Image (tube, rainbow, N blue to C red):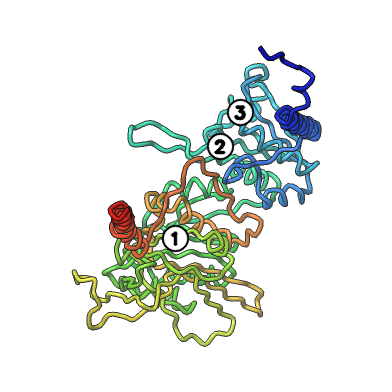
Amino acid sequence: MKKFDIGKSFKNNRFKYGGYSALAAILVLAVLVAVNLVASKLDIKKDLSKDKIYSITDQSVNIVKNLKSDVKIYAFFETGNEDPNVKMVLDKYESASKKVSVQYRDPIKQPQLAKKYSTSDKTVGAGSIVVESGSKFKTVDYNDLYNYSSNQYGQTDINSFAAEQQITNAIIYVTSGTQHTLYTLTGHQEKQLDEDIKKQLDVENYQVKDINLLQGNAQLVKDNLLVVNAPLKDISKEEADKIKSFLASGGRAAFFVDITKEVLPNFQSVLSAYGVKPQNALVVEGQADMIANSAIELLPSIQSHDIVNAIKSNKTPLYMPVMQGIENLKLNKDSLKIEPLLSSSSNSWAKTNLNSTKMSKETGDLNGPFNIAVAITDEDKTSGNTAKLIVVGGSTFMNSNINSATSGTNLDFVMNSFNWLQDKKDSITIRPKNFETSSLMINELQKLAWSGVVVILIPLVIAILGVTVWFRRRHR
């Protein structure tokens, strides 16, 4: 039997290569340990989540960096039960500015402090966030930090994280001297604003009230924002004069105008004074990549404007069903500027016969393209007043079901419009960050292309490969 020589075994190539591999592994492990130790000491963290859920945007950072007064944030959690998601976001605010301090308080151990910040509308409890500056404070409920939805089994799921949205707007509220009031016109069978929009208006520090301009001494003042949402009946001449006077004094207004069978001459006189007219004709899109499910469900072309630039750069579609065009009138007024926001294609047309059951183009129909949303500015250099208007040729797009199909992009458009009207440059809306996959909007052209790939191309490739393999085997 051959004697085993231990000395020689250390000299053979196998041992050498194995030793090099082991040494390399040890060195890599040592480097990793060292990097982790350094990172833990320096508190280096990187948010790798898709929507940067645990970070705050540059917009929020700039807001807290430019604070003139101190802001205290009280996070009410039972000791040891702090929400890690919320804690990571609050840490970002505190590290972004010396003006911001975050303090954790236990509502069970400190009930008097929780009671101090409780109001008739909101009770401070476990999970509440209170943002305070000077004598002003705003309470954010824990349930408002997350957005929920029901799945197909009737269970409630968390679909997005709204902590930054809520906290940044609370900081703006407690550090700003004014709160904007939004009035929705009533008395003409107008639609109510959707609950999603009302909730977002509250988050962004708008006070929402109804106004009937024929009741009592109801008046609009310069700092107000008027919203007229799809009236079915005409306003009176008195109301039209009040709205015109409000706008002439530098007022701001948003008009969402549905197609109506009834003529609205007084309402139209307000819009005509600012160079536009709803065409009262249903826009039909003829370009496949600008259609959602049917030719009257538009994925409009997004133009360049402060209201829509962020939406355009994110390449997220707006979903605008049942729209009419906004016609520019030939108004000789140098101070007036009308800017398109959303448009149909040159292959579109508009149905003037509202009783027609055909979607195809007929005699009397209008030729596209059409502006379906415009922004208007009228700067009076004599008085120094600047009127601002948004006119949109429909209101269905604001429905919560329509908005959810765009993962909130339609709501972005509405809120960006309101903020632009109110010159809220520092309040470009911060949106909740999704935990779930966003809805995928596929236009008709994309549907056709993918159908061709699945039904024709893939089976054809498989068939060609199969014939090729069979042919080669047969001729071996």
Q: Earlier in the sequence, mark 1 or mark 2?
A: 2
- What residue lies at 39% left-to-right and 68% top-to-bottom? 393
Q: Secondary structure at mark 1?
A: loop
Please tell me the numbered disc located at residue 145: 2
Q: CA distance from mark 2 to mark 3?
A: 11 Å
Q: Are marks 2 and 3 in contact (CB under 8 Å)?
A: yes
Task: Name the residue nearer the viewer: 351 or 253.
Answer: 351
Disc number lying in front (2 or 3): 3
Task: Name the residue nearer the viewer: 474 or 333.
Answer: 474
Q: CA distance from mark 3 to mark 1?
A: 34 Å
Q: Quadrant of residue 48?
A: top right
Please name the residue that numbered disc 3 is placed on. Answer: 83
Amino acid marked by disc 1: Leu
Percent position of residue 73, x then y: 70, 35
Side (left or right) of 404 relative to 310: left
Task: Name the residue nearer the viewer: 246 or 182.
Answer: 182
Percent position of residue 460, x then y: 30, 58
Side (left or right) of 206 relative to 151: right
| Residue 337 seen from this side | yes
Q: CA distance from mark 1 to mark 2?
A: 25 Å
Amino acid marked by disc 3: Asp
Q: Quadrant of residue 164?
A: top right
Amino acid marked by disc 2: Leu
